Image (tube, grey):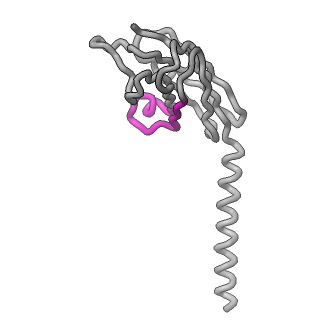
Amino acid sequence: MAIKAFRSHHRLAMMMSIMAGMLSLSAYAANVTVTVDGLRNANGTVRLKLDGSEAGWNNKAQAAATGHVKAAVNAVSYTFSDIPPGTYGLRVYQDEDDSGKLRTNMLGIPKEGYGFSNNPSVMGMPSFQQVQFTVTKEDISVVIHLKHGI
């Protein structure tokens, strides 16, 4: 009987310890608020992808987080909640026709607005190093200016 009570108490203590650890991890997570400006119209949805590694950036690993918000004329904001400290890169586009994909022409030039964290001025897809920013335990804001291909 005493052994059973000890095991039950031990399990409860372990579960409490695990839960406390999980709560302390979220105390070190931050919110990343993204403002996307330069929207030409209120058509469709602004889609956001937050990658936490170069592999994620190159579509070889799962995104750290994704989000979407209804488009509006000029600017929209979206907040990623409880993002653990680390290095991240953001890409966004205005999915004007809600197709779930960035429309391009035959040459691969985007027909819809798109942008990246740090707003690099490059032709084509920037590298993870060009778009990366650091998340600590403090909330941060990122502004992305949409570019328009054609």
Q: Is residue 33 left or right of residue 58?
A: right
Q: Quadrant of the N terminus?
A: bottom right
Q: Quadrant of the C terminus?
A: top left
Q: Is residue 9 above or below residue 109?
A: below
Q: Residue at x 50, y 9 (%)?
A: 121
Number of marks drawn: 0
Quadrant of the image occupied by residue 136? top right
Q: Is residue 83 left or right of residue 52?
A: right
- Taking the view exactly as shown, the residue that stands out farthest to the front is 42
Residue 11 or residue 81, whichever sits in front = 81
Give the percent coordinates (x, y) of residue 73: 57, 16
Q: Residue at x 64, y 86 (%)?
A: 4
Residue 13 visible somewhere in the drawing? yes
- Taking the view exactly as shown, the residue that stands out farthest to the bottom is 1
Task: Tell me where the magenta segment starts and ends, as one range.
Answer: 51-69
Give the percent coordinates (x, y) of residue 143: 62, 19
Residue 114 or residue 13, whichever sits in front = 114
Give the percent coordinates (x, y) of residue 57: 45, 29
Residue 144 visible somewhere in the drawing? no
Q: Is residue 136 above or below residue 92?
A: below
Residue 65 in the magenta stretch? The answer is: yes
Q: Is residue 113 above or below residue 23?
A: above
Residue 66 in the magenta stretch? The answer is: yes
Quadrant of the image occupied by residue 21? bottom right
Q: Residue at x 58, y 20 (%)?
A: 36
Give the percent coordinates (x, y) of residue 78: 60, 30
Residue 137 or residue 75, whichever sits in front = 75
